[in-house]
Amino acid sequence: MKKFIFSLLAMLFVFGCSKPEPNPELRDPIYQDFLAQKAATEKELTDTMAKMTEYSTAAKQAPPQTGQFKQNQRKLDEMDRRATKLEQQLQFWEIRIEERVVASRLSYNHAYAQKTPWPNQTEVDSYKAEKKLRLARTQWDQKERIRTLKLSSSLKNKASENIKGEE
């Protein structure tokens, strides 16, 4: 009898408990990607700050009228602009993470109520596609394209000679 009651309680405990997760964002791949990008930005910011101190000390120690002071000052200004941009990017990731926590909790609760799988794979796929497009190179370099296609100037010359010979 004790075994029966114990097995009944064990089954109720295992199969009867079904409540939503308190922190579903921890399973969200988009949230995890935001955290990774924030960590990368923080690392880049610390590296930039270290370079700024390096250039600052180099500018202070540079002998006068050698051009090293101006060179180090330009690098210091460039690093300062980069640090400002990275600080703004860090604030952006913090805001995006907060937004994603709220969005993932809402979508998880909705999916839990509907008994549908979560996270939504179409949302994750569309995020990955958007990220791939956002990170894609946006500048066009014709010379690089020629190199990637392995077209040399000698092949171009031969082709133009063939065209002239056919005329």
Image (cartoon, rainbow, N blue to C red):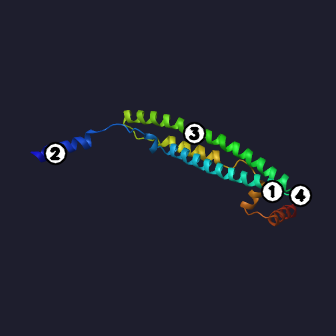
- C-alpha span from label 4 to label 3: 44 Å
The residue at 51%/43% (across/down) is 31
Compare residues 167 and 141 and report the one nearer the observer. 141
Circle 1 residues within 10 Å: few <14, some 14–19, many ≥20: few
Under circle 4, the secondary element is loop
Marking on residue 147: none
Q: Position of residue 55 (x, y in %)?
A: 76, 54
Circle 3 residues within 10 Å: few <14, some 14–19, many ≥20: some
The residue at 62%/47% (across/down) is 41
- C-alpha span from label 2 to label 3: 48 Å
Instruction: Pick whichever of labels 4 and 3 is earlier in the sequence.
Output: 4
Q: Amino acid at mark 2?
A: Phe
Q: Quadrant of residue 89?
A: top right
Q: Point out the frontmost of discs 3 and 1.
A: 1
**Above or below, 131 relative to 167:** above
Marking on residue 94: 3
| Residue at which label 2 appears | 6
Under circle 1, the secondary element is helix
Instruction: Pick whichever of labels 2 and 3 is earlier in the sequence.
Output: 2
Under circle 3, the secondary element is helix
Instruction: Pick whichever of labels 3 and 1 is earlier in the sequence.
Output: 1
Q: Is residue 115 left or right of residue 105?
A: left
Instruction: Pick whichever of labels 2 and 1 is earlier in the sequence.
Output: 2
Q: Position of residue 149 (x, y in %)?
A: 72, 60
Compare residues 48 and 130 and report the one nearer the observer. 48
Marking on residue 66: 4
| Residue at which label 1 appears | 61
Q: Amino acid at mark 1?
A: Gln
